[in-house]
Amino acid sequence: MAEIKALIFDLDGVIVDTAEYHYAAWKRLADQLGITFTKADNELLKGVSRVKSFDILLGLGPVEMSEGEKEPYRDQKNKWFVEYISKMTPADILPGVVDFIAREKENNRKIVLGSASKNAASVLKNVELIDAFDAIVDGTHVSAAKPDPEVFLKGAEAVQVAPKNCLVFEDAAAGVEAAINGDMYCVGIGAPEVLGKAHWVVPGIGYIKMEEFKRKIESL
């Protein structure tokens, strides 16, 4: 396998878990529009841009609107989400993340964020982790949603590392596909039945040892 020189992390479900905050904001908006929106429906929005997420939500109900009418609703959802995440602290960082990143920085690997969220920098500031990243590429820097690899390719470019030397950490199927589409290695964080296309699937960052990942790749 190629030498891993950069680690690219998705945010939600990998570094922190903001799924509940996203769900609360989307549910609040769905209720306002008279659309039934469940936690199972919320899974459809994982790793998806706000624009596409709102279209998915509208598809769940009888509501139709023009592109011009959609923007105020998307903005309202984001305002509610920002309100929720403003209360986040370092206690919201998922287990094993801080130690893993510190260890890999000592191994001279670049640490990059590649997230569809337009609030990624705010979240990292709130949990006091923003200084750990060599580059941050989020929804404000890209136009294509995962499974398009744009966010990861821009992350690799930001630290001047070739895609084949990058390892992506993702908790969404669309994100795993994006990494593979970008010719990168990928570790899925979550359930194998959802993330089966990843090169390796683990329950969380704390379970990862790079030596074990190398052995896993070499055995494929």
Image (cartoon, grey):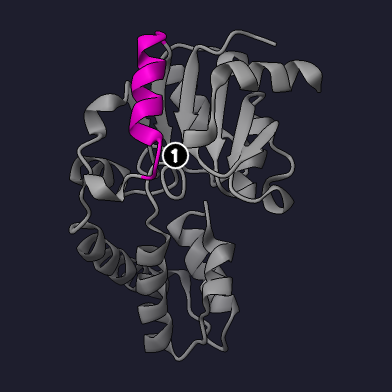
What x and y, as percent, mark residue 212?
63, 21
Viewer can see residue 148: no
The residue lying toward the viewer, choosing from 24 and 74, is: 24
Magenta-span inclusion, residue 99: yes
* Image quadrant assignment for residue 198: top right
Q: Residue at x 53, y 83 (%)?
A: 64
What x and y, as percent, mark residue 145?
54, 47
Q: Residue at x 74, y 40 (%)?
A: 197
Q: Is residue 99 above or below residue 6?
A: below
Q: Quadrant of the N terminus?
A: top right
Q: Is residue 6 above or below residue 148?
A: above
Horizontal placement of 152 versus 115: left or right?
right
Under mark 1, the amino acid is Val
The residue lying toward the viewer, choosing from 213 and 177, is: 213
Magenta-span inclusion, residue 101: yes
Q: Residue at x 20, y 50 (%)?
A: 89
Disc 1 designates what residue? 142
